[in-house]
Image (cartoon, rainbow, N blue to C red):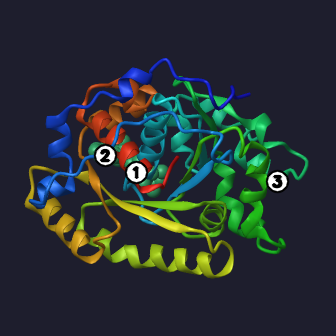
């Protein structure tokens, strides 16, 4: 089980480090020629002010845009600063679980996974929590059978509220809970959005990605109207940004024009370091701690704290 939420991380110092040259080249403001934005360094949140965790869904129905990469590395960046963070692998591909170092043999086990938890009304969420190699970063693993959720829950009453209900026993144990959603807008994603305070939308800097954004927004609107009126969009995160091509820059400009309040200043550039860190089963913040990718996710954590999206 997890330690207490107030335990400071021994990696605290790292999170305050920032490589200003990397940061500058990884911001929308620098690329769009706007004034530089600064965000305060992370401090451990005051748990007395608000004991319940802030819950964030990482959503986009388009595949391969960096949802899982963002969940793992944003989570690791927040945990570095002394926060207690829980990640939930809500995708049948279970890539987040693999990315945190769980071996394929254990992945096959249904018991211990979020799928088992969703299906056992007597199960306690706290018993399903695993520790990652990063202090303060816990997770609940996924399972391939999550793919059956749409059909399995179809006739259940209040099926959209299953995850929210399930999380209640651990809400006071964490500062932030991040949910890695599958590339669909079905029952699981609606469950995640219903359980969340905010939604973060990673978006690849490719033209077709913009076209799919209206679908994500429609789903968010439906959830706000029907199951969770408190949900808000924290921001759109430009991912896999290719500094070498004008196309990424053009798409970033389009997103910034269409969604000026939602586009985040931090952008995540394309680098093979993310795939390498996944193979090693650890976040980029520990695998390549001083890399541009790690710096970008630490900056994202600071930006989201300053927006109130995470604690
Ligand atoms: N900024 C980046 N630069 C280069 N590669 C990246 C970047 N972000 C993610 N990747 C790689 O792209 C692939 C897809 O990323 P990821 O799994 O995070 O996307 P996803 O949106 O979760 O995908 P899915 O929809 O299938 O769940 C992975 O191999 C990952 O390592
Ligand atoms: Mg994924």
Please tell me which residue lies in front, 175 or 215. Answer: 175
Mark 1 or mark 3: which comes first in sequence? Answer: 3
Residue position for label 2: 39
> Residue 127 has which mark?
none
Residue drawn at x 64%, y 36% is 107
**Identity of the residue drawn at 34% across and 37% down:** 275
The residue at the far right in this view is 122
- From the image, tell me which residue sits under label 3: 119
Label pair 3/2, CB-CB below 8 angstroms:
no
**Label pair 1/2, CB-CB below 8 angstroms:** yes
- Whether residue 103 sits left or right of residue 62 in the image: it is right
Q: Is residue 111 visible?
A: no
Measured Cα–Cα span from mark 3 to mark 2:
42 Å
Percent from the top left, x then y, of residue 294? 32, 34
Looking at the rendered structure, the secondary structure element under dot 1 is helix
Query: Can you tell me whether the CB of the residue at mark 1 lies under 8 Å from the nearest atom of ligand 1?
Result: no
Give x and y (percent) for residue 302: 37, 43
Crowd class of label 1 (few under 14; some 14 to 19; many from 20; radius 10 Å): some
């Amino acid at each position: 089980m997890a330690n207490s939420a107030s335990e400071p991380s021994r990696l605290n110092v790292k999170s305050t480090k920032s490589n200003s040259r990397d940061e500058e080249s990884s911001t929308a403001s620098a690329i769009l020629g706007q004034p530089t934005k600064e965000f305060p360094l992370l401090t451990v949140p005051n748990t007395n002010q608000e004991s319940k965790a802030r819950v964030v869904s990482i959503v986009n129905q388009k595949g391969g845009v960096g949802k899982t990469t963002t969940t793992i590395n944003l989570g690791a960046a927040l945990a570095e600063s002394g926060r207690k963070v829980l990640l939930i692998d809500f995708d049948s591909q279970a890539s987040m679980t693999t990315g945190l170092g769980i071996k394929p043999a254990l992945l096959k086990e249904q018991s211990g996974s979020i799928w088992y938890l969703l299906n056992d009304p007597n199960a306690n969420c706290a018993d399903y929590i695993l520790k990652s190699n990063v202090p303060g970063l816990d997770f609940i693993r996924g399972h391939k059978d999550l793919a059956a959720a749409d059909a399995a829950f179809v006739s259940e009453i209040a099926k959209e509220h299953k995850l929210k209900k399930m999380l209640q026993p651990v809400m006071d144990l964490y500062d932030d809970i991040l949910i890695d959603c599958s590339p669909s807008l079905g029952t699981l994603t609606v469950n995640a959005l219903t359980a969340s305070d905010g939604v973060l939308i990673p978006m690849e800097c490719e033209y077709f990605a913009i076209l799919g954004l209206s679908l994500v927004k429609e789903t968010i609107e439906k959830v706000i109207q029907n199951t969770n009126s408190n949900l808000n969009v924290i921001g759109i995160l430009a991912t896999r940004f290719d500094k070498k091509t004008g196309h990424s820059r053009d798409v970033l400009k389009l997103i910034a024009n269409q969604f000026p309040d939602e586009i985040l200043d931090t952008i995540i550039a394309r680098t093979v370091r993310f795939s390498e860190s996944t193979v090693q089963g650890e976040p980029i913040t520990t695998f390549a701690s001083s890399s541009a990718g790690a710096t970008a996710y630490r900056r994202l954590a600071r930006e989201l704290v300053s927006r109130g999206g995470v604690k």
